């Protein structure tokens, strides 16, 4: 039976404004079960208006994002979409994040705390109309220093009623590595400039001292300045659209819609927790191979997920102490990763809002590599650690979710960062465009994993080859899928991506194969894991691409002349060998100096398979052989399917030997055994 | 190639403190009525990061039922040196 309207009203009306962080009672009634009177009592508006306003808020953040995409100058914003836009409610509602844009979910899930921490430290009473605040401290707002929060308080009739925000990657924020992407920085002083909550605009006028503070400490100010101006314009657009909503629907309805938006997500997650995960304790481990100091220490994540009734608790106790260099992440990143993992596994329909966490508590010992503390718990390559949270949750819930489980993705950005000087003296910098930033997803019960996207908690674009080559002195030689790398399964994991670049000037390069020892693309529901990641360098004396006017050969023997940067490789042939190879440590050189004519080859991990590969339709395996996702040998070894013919020269006339396939499948054990 | 064997960095644990009967009473818990068969030893107190930020919770460990949830510091385990500033 539904509670009376007055009881529902009491739950939200009894929190005094000066006690905004006081815990609210958990809901006992779903939105769908409320009467219209109960709904109005709780939200001060009707269902139709609340859902119209919720849709308008999503429209606003999408417009803010489109605005920035079309006006940004740096490749990381313009072509990578390395930003997100959010709307948060006011202080007296505890800053609920009620809407987020379509891009990086990890950005959006750190914003609820990011907004609260920024405004509370700055002082809500110090806000003025026309302000923009910025902050970038990973310990205050999550992520890393290059991901700057731009926050605009929205005033309506003289008081702050909301916040529109952009979290946007800046090409550089100072520190010892141009562009910042490095796992070798040893303390917060090396990572880049840390900005505590600070005014960037006041009275709609730029605060010159803040701009100077940034430009005095960061490289590429000539690109940062127009990017920041574009960001400011996107905030103004969000403000204008939000004020239109307030004028049209009124403040009461707006506040109601803010709460309603978060409650929709909370309801959906609560229902999914209750119905899709049986009560119990689920444990799993994952980790990072090494930090940037030496290869003597591995970092293990221990994750325990306890579920009872409507509630989940995730505990990281037992996880390794923080790393000695910048591979760590922070608690807000952990929270984001937990939320995204559960969204991916059990609840995909409701929007990302702060309400997703209403029935989720996260327990974290401070000072682990996932909960690093300053000054020596250095955070920069935060996704490489927080992705271990997602993988561990996938592993922990794999059995209990059964067919609902999904295969792991490539579990990394395998990021490349480089800089140098062109022949005419211009400094160039590339970040996250020429490594293994795009790769495969795992398979699900619905189908094979896609092979070229970003990992599960990003949702970025892949810059066009022409844009990359116009930006830096590089030739993109190859973007290719590698056969027999996707985890075998009834549905196959996406194939590993090989990206190969040829560098036209000398340069300093960094690569981040932090997950080379074990596959991140874990299998699900009886599927197998994908292969592991690796990076190789080919100096011109090993193979002179320019002089020979030939591509690097695709044959395995070419690896013998390479300089391995990281991976599990055969020590003689330098070929990837996840099962029996030896570990090549990515920071054996802190910076990989490469002369003009050097080629780099990045190979991502493969996506995890779903379901027993012995049950995959032989015709689908044949098609994979035709499309070079699987070799004839791989079809036999991993799927028990005997394919005959010539996939390279006569791909349309491949045949499946059904009798031989039946015999092979009857005799073979599970490929992962 | 790295020939040296690596070891695991040591693990850290978030302690869960025992609570007193008085703490449960202060939280409005009537053990016999609300948690029949449970004792004070079935509850623990510890920090969590949740929807509204960091909290110190007291929870019944078997059912995850929260009986107390008090806001903790904004940044959880991290405090700012500037919090010691005395501003007029």
Image (cartoon, coloured by chain):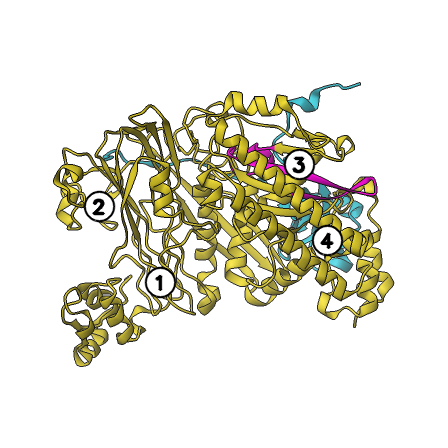
Q: Name the residue under label 3.
A: A117
Q: Which of marks 2 and 4 is nearer the N terminus?
A: 4
State whether discs 4 and 1 lie on one chain: yes
**Residues under labels 2 and 4: Cα distance?**
53 Å
Instruction: From the viewer's perspective, tell me whether residue A467 is left or right of residue B12.
Output: left
Badge 2: few (under 14), some or many (20 or more) residues near its Cα, within 10 Å? some
Disc number lying in front (2 or 3): 3
State whether discs 1 and 3 lie on one chain: yes
State whether discs 2 and 3 lie on one chain: yes
Instruction: From the viewer's perspective, tell me whether residue A577 is left or right of residue A206.
Output: left
State whether discs 2 and 4 lie on one chain: yes
Instruction: From the viewer's perspective, tell me whether residue A422 is left or right of residue A85.
Output: left
| Subunit of label 3 | A
Disc number lying in front (3 or 4): 4
| Subunit of label 2 | A
Classify residue A669 by image quadrant: bottom left
Q: Mark 2 points at which residue?
A: A581
Start-end of magenta stretch: A135-164
Question: A561 and A64: which one is in front?
Answer: A64
The image shows residue A480 at horizontal and vertical percentages of: 27, 53
Residue at position x 63%, y 55% in the image: A58
State whether discs 3 and 4 lie on one chain: yes
**Secondary structure type for disc 1:** loop
Q: Are marks 2 and 1 in contact (CB under 8 Å)?
A: no
**Residues under labels 2 and 1: Cα distance?**
22 Å
**Secondary structure type for disc 3:** helix
Q: Earlier in the sequence, mark 1 or mark 3?
A: 3
On residue A258, which mark appears? 4
Q: Earlier in the sequence, mark 2 or mark 1?
A: 2
Q: How many marks?
A: 4
Q: Mark 1 points at which residue?
A: A609
Disc number lying in front (1 or 3): 3
């Amino acid at each position: 039976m539904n509670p009376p309207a007055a009881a529902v009203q009491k739950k939200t009306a009894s929190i005094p404004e000066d006690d905004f962080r006081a815990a609210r009672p958990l809901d006992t009634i779903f939105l769908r079960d409320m009467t219209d009177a109960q709904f109005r009592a709780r939200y001060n508006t009707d269902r139709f208006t609340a859902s119209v306003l919720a849709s308008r808020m999503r429209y606003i953040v999408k417009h803010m994002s489109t605005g920035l995409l079309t006006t940004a100058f740096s490749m990381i914003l313009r072509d990578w979409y390395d930003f997100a836009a959010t709307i948060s409610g006011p202080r007296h509602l505890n800053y609920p994040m009620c809407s987020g844009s379509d891009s990086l979910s990890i950005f959006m899930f750190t914003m609820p705390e990011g907004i609260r921490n920024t405004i509370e430290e700055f002082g809500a009473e110090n806000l003025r109309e026309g302000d923009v605040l910025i902050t970038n401290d990973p310990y205050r707002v999550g992520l890393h220093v290059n991901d700057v929060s731009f926050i605009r308080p929205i005033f309506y009739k003289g008081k702050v009623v909301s916040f529109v925000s952009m979290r946007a990657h800046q090409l550089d924020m100072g520190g010892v590595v141009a562009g910042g992407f490095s796992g070798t920085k040893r303390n917060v002083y090396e990572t880049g400039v840390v900005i505590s909550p600070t005014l960037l605009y006041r009275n709609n006028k730029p605060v010159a001292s803040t701009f100077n503070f940034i430009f005095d400490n960061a490289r590429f100010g000539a690109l940062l300045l127009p990017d920041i101006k574009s960001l400011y314009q996107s905030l103004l657009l969000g403000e204008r659209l939000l004020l239109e909503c307030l004028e049209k629907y009124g403040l009461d309805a707006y506040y109601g819609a803010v709460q309603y938006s978060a409650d929709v997500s909370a309801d959906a997650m609560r229902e999914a927790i209750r119905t899709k995960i049986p009560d119990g304790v689920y444990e799993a481990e994952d980790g990072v191979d090494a930090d940037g100091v030496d290869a003597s220490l591995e970092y293990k994540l221990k994750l325990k997920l306890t579920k009872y009734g409507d509630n989940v608790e995730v505990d990281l106790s037992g996880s390794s102490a923080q790393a000695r260099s910048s591979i760590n992440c922070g608690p807000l990143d952990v929270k984001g990763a937990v939320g995204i993992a559960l969204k991916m596994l059990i609840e995909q329909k409701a929007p990302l809002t702060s309400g997703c966490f209403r029935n989720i508590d996260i327990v974290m010992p401070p000072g682990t590599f996932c909960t690093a503390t300053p000054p020596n718990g250095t955070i920069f390559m935060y996704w490489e650690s927080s992705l271990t949270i997602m993988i561990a949750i996938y592993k922990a819930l794999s059995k209990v979710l059964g067919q609902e489980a999904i295969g792991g993705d490539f579990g990394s950005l395998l990021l490349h960062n480089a800089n140098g000087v062109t022949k005419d003296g211009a400094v160039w910098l590339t970040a996250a465009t020429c490594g293994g930033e795009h790769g495969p997803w795992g398979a699900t019960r619905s189908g094979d994993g896609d092979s070229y996207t970003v990992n599960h908690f990003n949702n970025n674009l892949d810059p066009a080859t022409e844009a990359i080559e116009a930006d830096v002195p590089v030739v993109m030689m190859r973007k290719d899928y590698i056969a027999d790398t996707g985890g075998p399964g009834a549905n196959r994991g996406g194939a590993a991506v090989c990206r190969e670049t040829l560098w036209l000037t000398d340069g300093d390069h960094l690569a981040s194969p932090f997950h080379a020892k074990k596959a991140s693309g874990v299998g699900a529901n009886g599927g197998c894991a994908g292969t592991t990641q690796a990076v190789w360098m080919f100096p011109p004396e090993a193979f002179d691409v320019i002089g020979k006017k030939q591509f690097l050969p695709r044959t395995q023997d070419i690896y013998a002349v390479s300089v391995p940067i990281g991976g599990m490789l055969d020590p003689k042939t330098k070929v990837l060998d996840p099962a029996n190879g030896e570990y090549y440590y990515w920071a054996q050189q802190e910076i990989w100096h490469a002369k003009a004519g050097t080629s780099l080859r990045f190979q991502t991990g493969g996506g995890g398979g779903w379901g027993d590969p012995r049950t995959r339709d032989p015709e689908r395996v044949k098609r994979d052989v035709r499309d070079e996702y699987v070799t004839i040998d791989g079809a036999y070894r991993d799927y028990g399917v005997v394919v005959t013919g010539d996939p390279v020269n006569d791909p349309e006339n491949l045949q499946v030997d059904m009798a031989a396939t039946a015999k092979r499948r009857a005799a073979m054990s599970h490929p992962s055994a | 190639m790295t020939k040296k064997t690596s070891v695991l960095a040591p693990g850290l644990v978030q302690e869960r403190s025992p609570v007193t009967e008085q703490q449960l009473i202060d939280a409005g818990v009537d053990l016999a009525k609300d948690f029949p068969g449970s004792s004070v030893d079935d509850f623990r107190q510890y920090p969590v990061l949740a929807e509204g930020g960091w909290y110190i919770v007291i929870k019944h460990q078997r059912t995850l039922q929260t009986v107390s949830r008090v806001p903790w510091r904004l940044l959880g385990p991290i405090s700012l040196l500037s919090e010691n500033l005395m501003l007029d």
